[in-house]
Amino acid sequence: MDATHQLAAQPLIACHECDLLQREPATADHCNVKCSRCGAALFRNVPNGINRTIALSLAGLILFIVANVFPFLSFEIGSQFTQTTLFTGVREFYSQGIWLLALLVFITSILAPLLQLLLMLYIFIPLKFGRLARQTRPAFRLLQHIRDWNMIEVFMIGILVALVKLTKMAAIVPGIAMWSFVALIFLVTGAHSSIDGRVVWRRLERAQ
Amino acid sequence: MSPGAETRSDSSQPESALEASLTACHTCHQLVRIDQNHQQQKLSCPRCGSAIHPRIHNSLLITWMLVGLALVFYIPANLLPMTRVVGLGQTQEDTIMSGVIYFIQSGSWYIGLVIFIASVFVPLLKLTLLMYLLVSVQRKSQWRPRERARIYRITEFIGRWSMVDIYVVTILIALVNLGTLANIDSGPAAMYFATVVVLTIFAAKSFDPRLIWDNIKQEPTQ
């Protein structure tokens, strides 16, 4: 087969950022494919992506539980001592009557990463065994939109700033939950970036 | 081809999907044929079920409105106190800038810089870039579409980092909660500031970058 035939066999795609019609190039593993006109990331070829996503999300889910159940930071002035979990700040905002802020922090630091992990497991474990979970399509759609609202890496920077601010005032001790939280950032990011949307949608089409 | 290498897809005759009566689903990237006569109809993707817009409806208007609202809320977010610190009978209120100045004076200038960039600089930069993109599309600018596409991606990426200060306040009010000895409460600016961040996130989402390219008459020579 010559090059033109090979090219013609590739499906047509349109760039989601500039709308250019182009043929999807055949790619090697771990290739980032960018739009030939505007440079937007079109997709990434991840070998074994589904297995990676499942493995990383499972590990992430365990760490998520640890990060939310155990104390996050403890704070000591003299004999006084307070301990917080991830949820304490949300509760404080709520008790001050600023429920909108409570909701925003809750969604971006707890709900979105949890939903992301659960949805990945819900969709990909059955898919790995050639099955289809109920409502996979809306679930996958939600997964792709929820990622924007998971801001745990920004939260981490917030923690560092707060620590520097408070170290002059009192002794701050990071708890086990905080270390889990740091690892969670990498696991969720890794799990999500192992998803190759093309693979998933093609499998969904076949399973229809 | 080496791993991680960049592949550029080849197309000898550039054409937008819309010109070919096609559009890509924004969620699953499936190409869908659209009927030019039924532009007003609500379309949904046959593969994933998402709503399909060849271009986002009223993209420029909605983005302008969100940017304008964000600018309005940006003012109280910076003028009103972000935190109220009570320590041994004394009460101190801090705005974003006074917090930055406190960090610089107390020697942690790098933390002051982080807060300044995340809370003051990033929202303004994002709003300025979005306004520039809006004006450039409205004036049908031909100037460097590739660079403007990059600017759009920057506005999409940087917005979330403004949340840093909100999280700092979240952690402070959670930790420093010892009654009259030491207590930190959030001030009214926190609410305004969070609103600015959320509005700018929606503003970047409502801007349709394909509009930049619809105006380009000829391919830019790279």
Image (spheres, coloured by chain):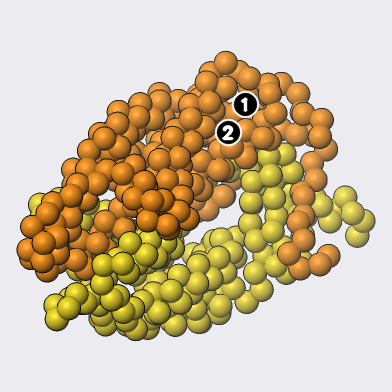
Classify 10 Å Cα crowding around label 1: few (below 14), some (14-19), many (20 and above). Answer: some
Residue toward you, B90 or B206: B90
Where disc 1 sits, the SS reads helix
Tags 2 and 1 on a common chain: yes
Residue carrying label 1: B214
| Residue found farthest to the right | A2
Quarter of the rendering containing residue B120: top left
Quarter of the rendering containing residue A176: bottom left
Residue toward you, B20 or B87: B87
- Are the residues tagged 2 and 1 within 8 Å (C-beta)? yes
Quarter of the rendering containing residue A45: bottom right
Q: What residue type is labelled 2?
A: Arg
Where disc 2 sits, the SS reads helix
User: Which chain does the numbered disc 2 sit on?
Assistant: B
In the rendered image, what is the letter of the chain coloured orange? Answer: B
Q: Which residue is drawn at 44% across and 35% down?
A: B124
Q: Residue A17 carries which label?
A: none
Chain A: its colour in the image is yellow
Residue toward you, B4 or B213: B4
- Label 2 and label 1: CA atoms lie apart by 6 Å
User: Which chain does the numbered disc 1 sit on?
Assistant: B
Residue toward you, A53 or A88: A88
Residue carrying label 2: B210
Q: What residue type is labelled 1?
A: Asp
Q: Position of residue B159 (x, y in %)?
A: 44, 45
